[in-house]
Amino acid sequence: MSAYLKNAWYAAAWSHEVGRQLLKRIIMEQSDASGKCVYNPNGNQVVPAAARLRTYALAEHNGILWIWPGDANRADLAQLPDLSYMEDPTRYAPVTGYLHVRANYRYITDNVMDNAHVSTVHQHTLGCESFLRATPHVKPQEGDTIWSYMTCPPGLPGAIWTEIWKAEHAGSAPGPMDHWVEIGWKPGATVMQETGMTPVGQPREHGIVTLNFHLMTPETQETTHYFWGICRTFQLNNSELDEQMKLGAAYAFSQEDEPMLAAIQAESGSQNFWAMKPSLIAEDIGLTKVRRRMDELMRAETASTDAGGFDR
Ligand SMILES: [Fe+2]
């Protein structure tokens, strides 16, 4: 079985990193749209027929440049995730970041699907005590998306959520809250998340909500390009809060998640996940469903002869 699911969309870059003119110029000057080289400045200027780039389907969507590493003929725009909140400044304030992670992309997916890690790995930042008393559950698969939920009994919020609440409520400290986390995964490694808290018993609209995404793009079997975004629904024009949220998330991801993931990778090497006989707890229900679905898709792709794309 291939180590990667090729027929799926992966984040290649933020759109703003890749100027359209630059992209167009590189392609137009040296090759045509099919990848065939059209430029040889030397001697007779004949271009060998075999001089051809591999080409991949690309799409720009919600401020992200996406790549489909498999068969370009199967690239399906309908499979792109809906991250339109990234482009609606009248309702959402997004912050984004990128991290190079020293772990296989599937371990990162496991981690962001795993609600239980928040109260341990992020004990002093995002986590709160009530997460330990939460009930995990999953919904039946919706299209190609698997949803995993965590609903928490009342509890005081963690450090970062307390600061966010204070920013929204003129500095007053939050009381006990109902917390919720809803996480959806789409193949190959797109995770969408809604997290929020509201005063106990109040409707969710009375609380604060963030819509998040985690996009894992394999670099090698042991390293990953990790793109993340967090959109809040409050204090839309507070640039200081933008900075605080970006710093807080970057700290949690780079100082708390990444070292743990790197350690898992170093310890497990190239061993098959299931062959290591992982000890699963009830809270692993979401990531287990995702693991099994991903295995199915990868097996089916490997069995088919038209996976296309690269083979690394
Ligand atoms: Fe985390």
Image (cartoon, rainbow, N blue to C red):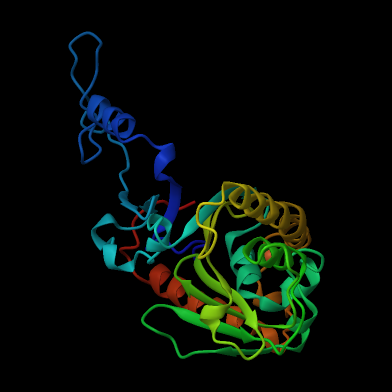
Assign ligand 1 to one image quadrant. Answer: bottom right
Q: Nearer the viewer, residue 107 or 173?
A: 173
Q: Is residue 295 visible from the viewing direction of this image?
A: yes
Looking at the image, residue 85 sits to the left or right of residue 209; the answer is left
Q: Nearer the viewer, residue 25 or 223?
A: 25
Residue that protrudes farthest toward the front in the picture: 170
- Image-quadrant location for residue 106: bottom right
Give the x, y percent position of residue 67.
38, 52
Q: Does residue 276 sit above or below 262 in this rendering?
A: below
Q: Does residue 268 sit above or below 51 in this rendering?
A: below
Give the x, y percent position of residue 13.
45, 45
Q: Does residue 312 sit above or below 149 in this rendering?
A: above
Q: Is residue 289 visible from the viewing direction of this image?
A: no
Looking at the image, residue 19 sits to the left or right of residue 225; the answer is left
Residue ID at (72%, 52%): 251
Residue ID at (34%, 70%): 304
| Count of number-bearing discs | 0
Residue ID at (36%, 34%): 19
Q: Nearer the viewer, residue 198 or 262?
A: 198
Looking at the image, residue 155 sits to the left or right of residue 29; the answer is right
